[in-house]
Image: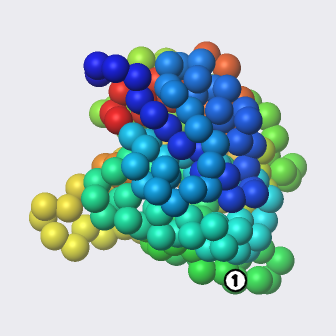
Amino acid sequence: MSGRRNVVVFDYGFGNVRSAERALARVGADVEITRDFDRAMNADGLLVPGVGAFSACMTGLREARGHWVVDRRLSGGRPVMGICVGMQILFERGIEHGVETEGLDEWPGVVGPLNAPVVPHMGWNTVKAPEDSEMFAGLDADARFYFVHSYAVRDWDFEATSAAMAVPKVTWATHGEPFVAAVENGALWATQFHPEKSGDAGAQLLTNWIETL
């Protein structure tokens, strides 16, 4: 990679934008926090954070035209990364307290409550990544990442519609039951955990993303 990469942290009111900004700057990116459509479209990378309820995040994202930004960037093969609820909204739909909300439908799947003795899942946990993962390159199998969530995708059912379609690489974690911890799908990456709060392991993961831009 030659030169510094510009990353926009999309500010639609539902994410820890400052911690994401600091973490990305730490690994050498030029970072801007904005909801400006053109800047978000033209950045080398777009990071979509997310905290709180699935439905509220989707409402905020649509009001900021973030759904258009994500769709248009991905249509052109431009990198996007979602974090926490910013990952969850990339799926088909979310169900919270009986309320069903449509997501961005980049991947099939339903975000639902975790079945675990203790919820929320809050703290450090290991993950099981595919051997050919780019996202987790350079990280040991026992690397730990910081999670804070009560909902997750428990079932992954993706069917390639053509032989040319790349099948996403899925990383799993377990808290009470297995759930999707991260997905790599060409220009679209996402994590259920918070790499920006995951110390050196998170910094390595963000470095790996920056190097794809």
- Residue 5: x and y, percent? 41, 29
* Residue furthest to the left: 163
Image-based side of 15 in relation to 160, left or right: right
Image-based side of 130 in relation to 114, left or right: left
- Residue 174: x and y, percent? 64, 45
Figure quadrant of the C terminus: top left
Image-based side of 2 in relation to 105, left or right: left
Q: Nearer the viewer, residue 176 or 35?
A: 35
Image-based side of 156 in relation to 196, left or right: left
- Residue 44: x and y, percent? 39, 40
Q: Give the residue drawn at x 79%, y 34%.
A: 123
Q: Is residue 66 above or below residue 129?
A: below
**Total labels drawn:** 1
* Residue furthest to the right: 118
Q: Give the residue drawn at x 28%, y 59%.
A: 76
Identify which amino acid the numbered label 1 is placed on: Glu
Q: Give the residue drawn at x 35%, y 59%.
A: 74
- Residue 113: x and y, percent? 75, 65
Q: Nearer the viewer, residue 101 or 7?
A: 7
Figure quadrant of the N terminus: top left
Residue 153's image quarter? bottom right
| Colour basis | rainbow
**Element carrying mark 1:** strand
Q: Nearer the viewer, residue 34 or 158?
A: 34
Q: Is residue 197 above or below residue 154?
A: above
Q: Give the residue drawn at x 67%, y 26%.
A: 22
Residue 177 appears anywhere in the view: no
Query: Residue at label 1?
Result: 100
Residue 75 appears anywhere in the view: yes
Q: Residues within 10 Å of mark 1 (few under 14, many from 20)?
A: some
Q: Is residue 20 above or below residue 26?
A: below
